Amino acid sequence: VFDKTGTLTIGYPQVAEVIPIAPFGADEALAIAAAIEHFSGHLLARSTVNAALARGLEIPVAHTAIETAGRGVAGIVGARQVAIGSLSFVAAAQPTAVAALTALHERTSGLRACLAVDGVGAAIITYADLARDGLPAFFAELRALGVTRILLLSGDHEANVAEIARRFGITEARGDLLPAGKVAVVRELLAQG
């Protein structure tokens, strides 16, 4: 049984793509997102800020921000109302942005954040959770040693967990688990012998 983040992956997702919605450009959306994400300690927030800095973008000043742990951040950047996070979080913060973001959200998968500015969908930022080096050989060696069952458990979204599992030939993967859920799975396995 393996956990994903920090075990099979490096545990530090990086911005893979910024998909803007007109009239926003990718760099403008990333700079606005980075401004508000400065207020968050979330791993994806740090990745967003680092990506903006790596691109040499001028990050505007965020005046206020309120973080809802694990869901997103909303506040004011310059004179603009900004919300970034899960689709449901952004929908609650800026409902008029939902239609444009939903259409784009349905065409993307994996780790991502939705960005709304002044009630308008601005972008979706996707993240790549990079796998550790040497894992294909490691899992091949486990199979060669006779290990017939490998499970991947994670708190990440089910689709992202399934993609990582597929990469390594892991046929049993479960996502959207809280830590207690992971413990429950291990206890079930122990009870099964």
Image (cartoon, grey):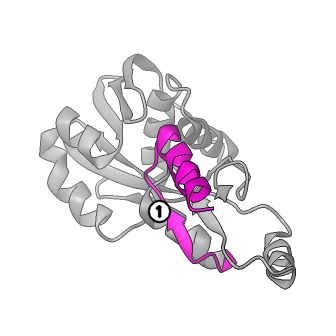
Seen from this angle, which residue lies furthest left? 96
Name the residue tied to disc 1: 110
| 65 to the left or right of 136 | left
| Magenta run includes residue 171 | yes
Residue at the image position 65 percent from the left and 40 percent from the top: 50
Mark 1: secondary structure: loop
Farthest residue, direction top: 63
Does residue 39 appear anywhere in the picture?
yes
Relative depth, front residue between 96 and 184: 184
Return the x and y of residue 94 as percentages of the image width and height: 19, 37
Q: Can residue 128 be seen from the camera position used here?
A: no
Q: How far across and how far down the image is residue 36, in percent? A: 44, 29
Q: Nearer the viewer, residue 68 or 156?
A: 156
Q: State the extent of the magenta-drawn residues as a range.
A: 168-193
* Kind of residue at badge 1: Gly
Q: Residue at x 58, y 58 (%)?
A: 189
Query: Which residue is at 47% across, 45% downward?
Result: 181
Residue 108 lies left or right of residue 180; in this view the side is left
- Residue 16 versus residue 121 in the image, above or below: below
Mark count: 1
Which residue is at the front of the view, 18 or 149? 149
Quarter holding the N terminus is bottom right
Question: Would you call the spot at circle 1 few (<14 residues within 10 Å), some (14-19), or many (20 or more)?
Answer: some
Q: Residue 139 placed where, x, y %?
A: 79, 75
Query: Residue 148, located in which quarter of the rendered image?
Result: bottom right
